[in-house]
Amino acid sequence: MTVSIQHEGEIAVVTVDNPPVNALGQALRQGLWDAVGTLDADPSVRAVVLICAGRTFIAGADVTEFGKPPVPPHLPDLVDRLEQATKPWIAAIHGSALGGGFEVAMGCRFRVALDSATVGLPEVTLGIVPGASGTVRTPRLAGVEAAVELVTTGRPVKAAKALSLGLVDAVVTGDLRAEAVAFARNALTQPLPQPISARPVTSPDAAWWEEQRKAIAKRAKGEVAPLRALDCLRMAAEKPFAEAMAHERATFLELRASDQAAALRHIFFAERGAPKPAHLDDAKPKDIRSAAVIGGGTMGAGIAAALRDAGLPVTLIERDAEAVQRGLQNLRSIFDGAVKRGKLTEAQAEARMDGVTAGSDYSLLAGTDLVIEAVFEDLAVKRAVFAQLGQTCRVGAILATNTSYLDPRLIAEGLPHPDRFLGLHFFSPANVMKLLEIVPTPTTSPETLATGFALARTLNKIPVQAGICDGFIGNRILKRYRAEAETLVRQGTPIAAIDAAMRAYGFAMGPFEAQDLGGLDIAFLQREGARAAGQDVPETLGDILVRAGRKGQKTGGGWYDYMPGERAPKPSETTARLLAENIGSGPVLGFEEIAARLTAAMAEEGRTILAEGIALKPSDIDLVEVHGYGYPRWRGGPMFAAG
Ligand code: 3H9
């Protein structure tokens, strides 16, 4: 039963039970619609508590219905009907009241939330605007400023913040149902507040709205929903309720059918599917209660920080006492940074460090459940590490390498019990970046692989399985992307035009400025290594720059010049001179053509990767690009964009 009614004296309790997240599909909308009628007609009922079974309050509209024509009762009508009910409804919120869920709560006369709950209007993250009065009722409930923040960022707020903003009326602990029923009884002893639609709203002046528009446009980088949401909010602040509602509904329906919304829905479902791959249904992951990282450099410290953030005790191994201290220092600066940005308190940072044991003696690892190697990208160095791990770790421990381009099979050669070995490719900064490429070898057991996915869940990362090839999924596509960008330069399109085109497409940076930031030498050394090993690797334009000492920002120049202490790229005459004889005088491409060429190259490489079985499905490639390489989320990733 999706909606059921119980009675506690004069208070009716309506329970919604629509797993997994009580999404507002048609049956639930109808159930609530009917419940209003039933309870209005029941003279024994004086107030109604609306509560949900399972892990959360109503988490929103049912996103799976968005590709189909809307079926009545429509959500805005249901919210109006709740508001017009002859008995006051009280929303009792646990988990998340999001989107349509929060709109339903705003149709109620009161909102009571558990202290662990969150509320919000995340619609813009799905490329739409709230479609059931979120942009119209929220300013009337919490004021225009709070509404603009909530709706245009899509970021939910925790219960305490929601209370301070006026989004909820009370925050309770313990038994939500009992607390909400008590709240209802008490509410009946006092005059009822106005329904939200009847409350006044004050609009800030035109200059304020203009400021918001500028700030949001800058943030949105081509994404349309946040600005359209702002338009709806302004309408709500300046026009009568009904007019604003009509505008919101029209905007919602238009955006729901847009390419951006389809792309964002694609990523939404890909993200939710990623941690539960069907081919591992029968494999039981091992329990990971402790972890270790070998190597305390940037990558190792970042991985250790991610493990500590997830609450795992961590052992950090470095080769000698001095390196151990450096590793600890790297880790400490990550947590110090988090304190500075207000993400952690001093005490939390201290507790993060207290959970780290560091040393150079591998015997510290005897009882560890998971060891992640993150030492220098050198096969011999990595093999030496695994030789020691093979001797010191228990047979049941999972052993992982964080290589980004070496062949994990070679790294694991000679390891006893190689079924427990796999590649875990983190992205820098490892405590921030969401992507985790999981690379099994032919000997990795399903149990070990499933543990990799379980670890990703623990670390709140997006796992994508990748097969073994040069660069796995992400770096292989990156290489192709950069090569295509160089081809355009060779054909006569200016470097700066290519970067600007990719920014206009939605990337934070173009391919050349990104290389200048990261350093051109890493990829150069890799190519040189391959050349030394006898492979035929043609000379790239990047090679010419590195050979001339131009490695990027750190040397004051790469593709661009940089003034000392500045990060703004300036077109470089030196680069132009160095590359002159490799550059033709072909047609200069426009922004759209440039982006089309580069994204098509990515998609083509993606198709090859799929054909080779390196990636299991197109949406995995899209997740890699969106979460590891800055591909604009609202474009859905290269495979989605290619159609
Ligand atoms: C909206 O409301 C528009 C309205 O303004 C206007 C309408 C007219 N629909 O995330 P999880 C599935 S827009 C359908 O792993 P958690 C999900 O795919 C909506 N399905 O759980 C997964 O399925 P499966 C605004 C949904 O506990 C399962 O539920 N709302 C929806 O880690 C579990 O999901 C949002 O954007 C949905 N709305 O996190 C909220 N949501 O098991 C989106 C989830 O088959 N949801 N599923 O893979 C969330 O943020 C999280 O799911 C939540 C729980 C925080 C609630």
Image: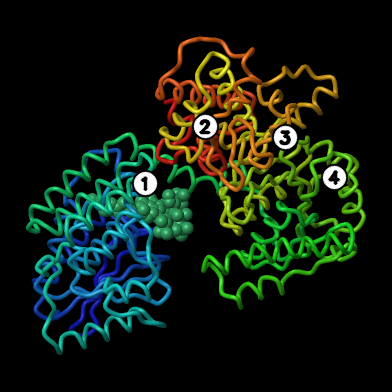
Q: Which image quarter is the C terminus in? A: top left
The alpha-carbon separation of the residues under discs 4 and 3 comes to 21 Å
Kind of residue sitting beneath label 3:
Asp
Q: Mark 2 touching mark 1, by CB under 8 A?
A: no
User: Relative to 111, is 373 on the left or the right?
Assistant: right
Q: Mark 4 points at which residue?
A: 382
Near mark 1 (Cα within 10 A), the count class, few <14, some 14-19 or many ≥20, is few
Q: Using the rendered image of the protein, determine whether residue 317 is visible from the camera's viewpoint.
A: yes
Label 4 or label 2, whichever lies nearer to me, is: 4
Q: Earlier in the sequence, mark 2 or mark 3?
A: 3
Q: Name the residue under label 3.
A: 521
Label 4 or label 1, whichever lies nearer to me, is: 1
Q: Mark 2 points at which residue?
A: 618
Near mark 4 (Cα within 10 A), the count class, few <14, some 14-19 or many ≥20, is many
The alpha-carbon separation of the residues under discs 3 and 1 comes to 32 Å
Q: Which of marks 3 and 1 is nearer the N terminus?
A: 1
